[in-house]
Amino acid sequence: MPKIKLPTKSPRIDMTPMVDTFCVVLTFLMLTTTMRQPEPANVDTPFSISEKPTPDFNTMTFLLSPDNRIFINFDNGPDTAYKFRPKVLAEMGKRYNIEFTEGELREFEKYPSSIGFPIQNMKAFLATKNNLERTAMQTGIPVDSTDNQLAMWILYIRQVNPAVQASIKGDSKTGFPIVKKALDILQERNVHRFNLITSLEATKINM
């Protein structure tokens, strides 16, 4: 008795649900992701073989540019409820007799990049939304002996967040005098331990 041969059909995969899910995830990421602000100065960090990552929270980073400008950046804390950034700015305002509004404090809290200008220009910096104007204002934090604003930033950052750690990010062509100046200010404020931010150097593995 001959066997009954059933017709064979090639399998069909419906990709529509996967494409729909991908579109939803992509739309969510586009709507919730904020573009990272560029740093006020281009810094080509030296290479090293250290693989220790920089911490994500409780950090204050000093950016040393090749033209001897110093910038500073610090995070808002591991919990957004801490609001370290507006508290530090408010303390700086008290020190220099500048009263910042609630809106200015919130604007400074949201600004993600490094800053480097006299505190007297902070209101104008926060008021403008033009990136070119903000870049032109970034002349570096004053470090003169008569008006050492970098030391005051360090003081109030450490007062508001005692767990903060210092990191230095310098260009490979940054002059030694400005590096020494930054280190001297850190030591004057009893910051004796800090991290050096470098680029990971490729290493050859011999089998």
Image (cartoon, rainbow, N blue to C red):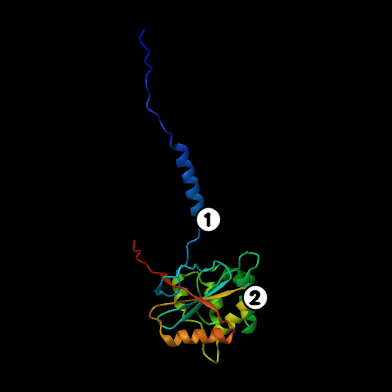
- Check disc 2 and report its element: helix, strand or loop: helix
Q: Nearer the viewer, residue 138 or 42?
A: 42
Nearer the N terminus, badge 1 or badge 2?
1
Q: Is residue 149 visible?
A: no
- From this viewpoint, which residue is outermost toward the bottom? 146
| Residue at (57, 87) in percent of width and height | 188
Which mark is drawn over residue 42?
A: none
What label does residue 160 carry, if any?
Answer: 2
Q: Residue furthest front?
A: 207
Q: Eyeballing the image, is 12 above or below 189?
A: above
Q: For the point 38% across and 17% down, which residue is it?
A: 6
Identity, as a three-letter code, of the amino acid under mark 2: Val
Q: Is residue 172 visible?
A: yes
CA distance for labels 1 and 2 = 29 Å
Q: Which residue is mark 1?
A: 32
Q: Residue at horizontal 47%, vertical 45%?
A: 22
* Residue type at the position of mark 1: Thr
For discs 1 and 2, the disc positioned in front in the rendered view: 2
- Report the quarter where the N terminus lies: top left
